[in-house]
Image (cartoon, rainbow, N blue to C red):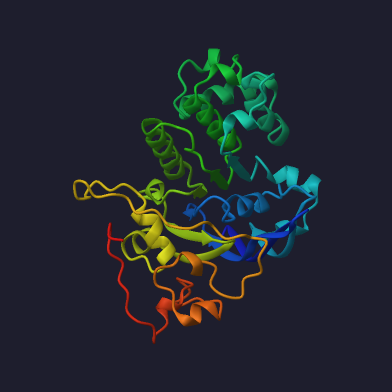
Amino acid sequence: MEYLLQISNLEVEFRTYAGVVRAVRGVDFVVAPGEVVAIVGESGCGKSVTAQSIMQLIPSPPGKITGGSIIFNGEEILRKNEKQMQKIRGNSIGMIFQDPMTYLNPVLTIATQVTENLRLHKGMTRKKALQRAVELFQLVGIPEPESRLKQYPHQFSGGMRQRVMIAMALACEPQLIIADEPTTALDVTVQAQILELIKGLKERFRTAIILITHDLGVVAGQADRILVMYAGQIVETGTLDQVLKEPLHPYTWGLLKSVPRLDAVKGQKLTPIWGQPPDLLQHFTCCPFLPRCDYAMGICSREMPPFFNGSRVRCWLNHPHAPTVEFKKGVS
């Protein structure tokens, strides 16, 4: 099977006054054409840094990609210079950022910002680019596109700004879209609309999508595969059904227990993951989830767990000689 994106042993670090932060530690995954891959985990686990590495948007200094390989469409991304990357960003790879107001220029009209990629990458005239922008706005459900294009970002609601970001990401019909927390700060109704929109566009254009989120509930019905990240590493991977119905890592269990369920018993409380995320200044010689795990064993404090179950999970509980522990939904 040919993959659109192949990431192998990716390492990213940030040099700070406090020391070297190893934000991404040996990450490996692939994305096939038309596939939706979700990367899930708490804030600070390395999700967004992984996405920014694909786009070569790691600020340097202090950040640096120190190892690994990112192959997109058969070409090594990490060997490309800034001029070569500018031909890829917004053209072959689109990105929907977490906070639209941060990435939309407040002093430029929406039309100027939406048509920029079309004029740069497709060589369109201003008139043709505006016509295409109107089509994109209709596609993402923005009413009265001709008049809305003349407005500024502050004149749009949060949900509409996110739709603008999606239109910009789709403008050049990229092969891959990276959606970094696309529903953050939106109310649940708008969240559902945005997710349904992304799903519909994926089915229509056969665009591959990397969906980054901290909420496993968001990916239900959206993703083909899920990667669970913790402390800069992928600790569990599998299909949507495997991860949601048969999770294998205690951290994944904790994420699932912290999501509200429609079938929950009345009065049943959510169970948060106790403790704090690990300090990424540390060099881990054992399982990084050890201080927060209810099922830790002696070996967990001595050795870093390898992958078990056909490279599905990185946890000693899945060793053939480990005690049997079953995940029970909604039970702490």
- Residue 36: give x, y in percent of width and height: 47, 52
Q: Position of residue 134 (x, y in %)?
A: 54, 22
Tell me which residue sits at (40%, 56%) in the image.
Answer: 255
**Percent of width and height locating residue 270:** 32, 50
Residue most toward the left?
266
Q: Residue at x 63, y 20 (%)?
A: 111
Evaluate whether residue 239 shows in this view. Answer: no
- In the displayed structure, 49 sits above or below 184; it is below
Viewer-side residue, 289 vs 244: 289
Location of residue 77 (image quadrant)? bottom right
Q: Does 127 sit above or below residue 223? A: above
- Please name whichever residue, 330 or 149, is drawn nearer the observer in this view of the structure: 330
Snapshot quadrant of residue 169: top right
Instruction: Determine whether, in the image, residue 152 is placed left or right of residue 195.
Output: right
Residue placed most toward the observer, 244 or 251: 251
| Quadrant in the picture for the C terminus | bottom left
Residue found at x 60% / y 42%? 94
Q: Residue furthest bottom?
A: 321
Can I make out residue 46 in this image? yes
Instruction: Please report the residue visible at 65 percent of the width from the left and 40 percent of the height from the top.
Output: 90
Number of numbered discs on residues: 0
